[in-house]
Amino acid sequence: MTISYIPLDKEKHKDLKINLQHDFGYAKEAHIAAASIREYAQLASVMPVVFVKDPNSENFHSVTMLGTEKGSNLFIHEGKWQVHCLPMNIQRYPFDVRPDGEKLGVFFDENSALITDDGEPVFTPEGEPSPFLENRQQLLSELANSEMATQRFIKKLVELDLLDPIELLVNYANGEKRNITGMFSVSEKRLQDLSEEQVVELHKSGFLGAAYAVLMSLGQLNRLVHLSNNTDKPIQNLQLRVGDAISKEQPAAEQPANS
């Protein structure tokens, strides 16, 4: 069913209830999810964090890799999330924060399968936000604030020329091979070559740790291989190429699409 976000209204939606016991069906086809700087450290312990470029605006965005195939989320198996960390952009569903006139407002997907008759109430009988909604509003506020910090971080990476293209060579157990390009990561060499003044500036802004978290997260590519064993298309191995090591004769880019 098509996703349709509408403004949350306490009068129109006073009886709205959300099912908290679900099988992550809304995320099973998401092979990437938006990632914010606030959660890099946690995400880096369980999944790769990379950058993709919007072909229209040319702006970079940070995302987590949830799979190597469009339409397949390796972190969901038999309705359960397979690791301890859940990206905030997946936690927030079916809610979102979006411009509503001159301010930001809470929206929800009116077509979401999580809307049920016996779920968690969004509003109290008095029409006030329920504890559940207050929790979600806090999460949405954190997401909005973290997104602004994330964009500042990415702007600094671009300014310092610290982004390198990366390529994944995927070998499947069935013999199929494919290259995944259109992604970027932090250049470890150029990060180490920064001046002392630049390093101090990154450290004071909280960006130095974030840069290294992104680098460390690439070690979680092996987790994708492991999780693929739960699918009908297991991965035999993944090979990562960075920057100058990328083949000059590579196929057309298979860029991750925003989920």
Image (cartoon, rainbow, N blue to C red):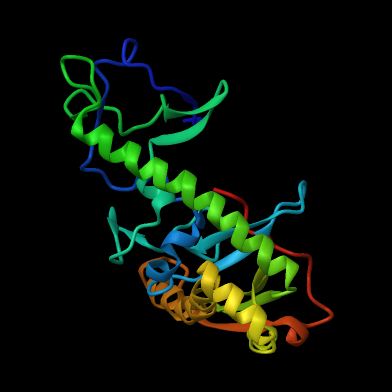
Q: Quadrant of residue 230?
A: bottom left
| Quarter holding residue 171 | bottom right
Q: Where is residue 147? Give x, y as percent.
A: 53, 50
Specify whether 182 is left or right of 99.
right
**In the rendered image, the vertical position of residue 36 relative to residue 181, given as above or below:** above
Which of the pair 255/36 is nearer the observer? 36
- Residue pictured at 37% horizontal, 68% vertical: 42
Farthest residue to the right: give it: 248
Residue 81, horizontal then vertical, whole percent: 30, 59
Q: In this view, does 88 lie to the left or right of 165?
A: left
Q: Where is residue 115 in the image (x, y as percent from the top left)?
A: 30, 28
**Label tally:** 0
Q: Quadrant of residue 242?
A: bottom right
Can residue 198 be seen here?
yes
The residue closer to the viewer here, 116 or 108, is: 108
Residue at screen point 17% across, 14% down:
126
Residue at horizontal 56%, vertical 20%?
101
In percent of width and height, residue 98 lies at 52, 32
* Residue at the outermost top position: 11
**Identity of the residue drawn at 38% across and 36% down:** 94
Q: Can you see residue 176?
A: no
Residue 54, compared with residue 243, is above or below; it is above
Of residue 187 and residue 54, the one placed in the foreground of this image is: 187
Q: Looking at the image, is 42 positioned above or below residue 86?
A: below
Q: Nearer the viewer, residue 1 or 112?
A: 112
